[in-house]
Amino acid sequence: MSTPSSAPSSAPARSRRIALGVIATGTLMVVLDGSIVTVAMPAIQSDLGFSPAGLSWVVNAYLIAFGSLLLLAGRLGDLVGRKQMFLAGTALFTAASVLAGAATTPAVLVAARFLQGVGSAMASAVGLGILVTLFTEPRERARAIAVFSFTGAAGASIGQVLGGVLTDALDWHWIFFINLPIGLATLAAGAYALPAVRGIGLAAGADVLGAVLITAGLMLGISTVVTGGERGWTSGVTLGSGALAAALLVAFVARQATARSPLMPLRIFRSRAVSGANLVQVLMVAALFAFQILLALYLQNVLGYGAGATGLAMLPAAALIGAVSLGVSARLNARFGERNVLLVGLVLLVGVLGLLARVPVHADYVTDLLPVMLLAAGFGLALPALTALAMSGAADGDAGLASGLFNTTQQVGMAMGVAVLSTLAASRTEGLLADGMSQAVALTGGYRLAFAVGAGLLAVAFAVALVVLRRPSERPGEPVPATTRTTAA
């Protein structure tokens, strides 16, 4: 059995910077694609003739494929080589983007979106694993993680801005065609700059049964979540598919406990940092991805903003998230510790959704919405710290697995947040309409409820981070030296 070399941290600094740029660009392209379609959905529906229920599959097909395959792709990256997995995923994503842009029927677009999700999973699952083995010196790694986290923290907001601009200036096809030059450039630079580190070999972890169980369980589970609101949460189909998904996931865990070469060694969860950070991420992303979707709907459906205006209205949040994650997060993490920075970020984010839970029907952008955009800078603090914590407990040979797990919990959180909070908003809106409220008042009431529940999820995430991510040797109220990393291995 071959063993992977720890990464070429001795590689020239210039090569490592190029590799970081490749990973960040590829990841940004993937993150953008997850949100760029949201403001173009009305145009896509009008042009291709989607039914209201069918239109949701433009997003659902991508989420299901992406979220279901991340864990498998991360482990395969450890086995066959992370560079190969990253380049293959980027190539598939780029080709699928061209197919999506050229789609003339709903079926073709949904199929292309599914393929985009597969390619996204392959590339995203190993990107963070490549990064943490390239940058081994703590300060360098902190800066690299800050750059990587920017792609996730600001990418979704930038996607909404870019989607609105492209849809208004050209047409919706270009939200997909724009990936072609970016993808080709990423492939060319990646072939040159990414380290060609050998995987540990399929024989070291080719757990076929485990792969089938986890992929089927996640795919069925995420599909159940994203369609639960449409079918009804208490319908026989929803309850049955949810129970089957849970059974498959339980069977996967049992398999991993007994398999000679497990796909996901359960030892990774012995790290409080890994387990705690992934739990915090599910809660945080569930609240914040739904916030982005529902805020865009509020701006368009209640305040009457167009696609371009919606994107521009959310631009301050994207700019601040980027500035904080790239400009100060690494220094703050080094000075105060990742856990403490994460807690501050979560407090700011509770403020974001707390303010939105009281948003008026006739909101003024400067007084009612701009403060929300400014507090969103908390995401630029929280995500880099959370990423560092999630990767801190993984050995080099498990870096791809830890990366895939972190991305998986992100996608599961996104799917759950959108499905559950959107359903709550819709139910509240229907109730207010039945009580004789106007459309604008009813919609606003539904969005307020969803934002309030999202604030509650963030409060729970704060509690988990406070309790679980405390180092075993740390006592409440005891200061942590600035030179000590606040990770719990």
Image (cartoon, rainbow, N blue to C red):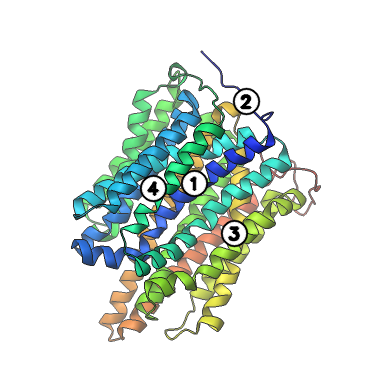
Specify the amino acid type for callout 1: Thr
Q: Quadrant of the C terminus?
A: top right
Q: Which residue is mark 4?
A: 180
348 vs 286: above or below: below
Q: Is residue 41 left or right of residue 372?
A: left
- Mark 1, residue position: 27
Left or right of 117, for residue 487: right
Q: Amino acid at mark 2?
A: Ser
Taking 188 as reference, is 427 left or right? left
Helix, strand or loop at mark 1: helix
Label drawn at residue 322: 3
Earlier-in-chain disc, 1 versus 2: 2
Residue located 77% across and 54% down the image: 477
Asked which secondary structure carries label 3, the reply is: helix
Mark 2 element type: loop
**Amino acid type for the residue under numbered disc 4:** Leu
**Comes first in the chain, label 3 or label 2:** 2
Q: Residues within 10 Å of mark 1 (few under 14, many from 20)?
A: many
Q: Is residue 72 above or below residue 35?
A: above
Rendered view: 22 above or below 206? below
Q: Secondary structure at mark 4?
A: helix
Could you tell which of marks 2 and 4 lies nearer the N-terminus? 2
Q: Position of residue 166 (x, y in %)?
A: 38, 64
Q: Which residue reaches farthest top?
A: 1
Q: Earlier in the sequence, mark 3 or mark 1?
A: 1
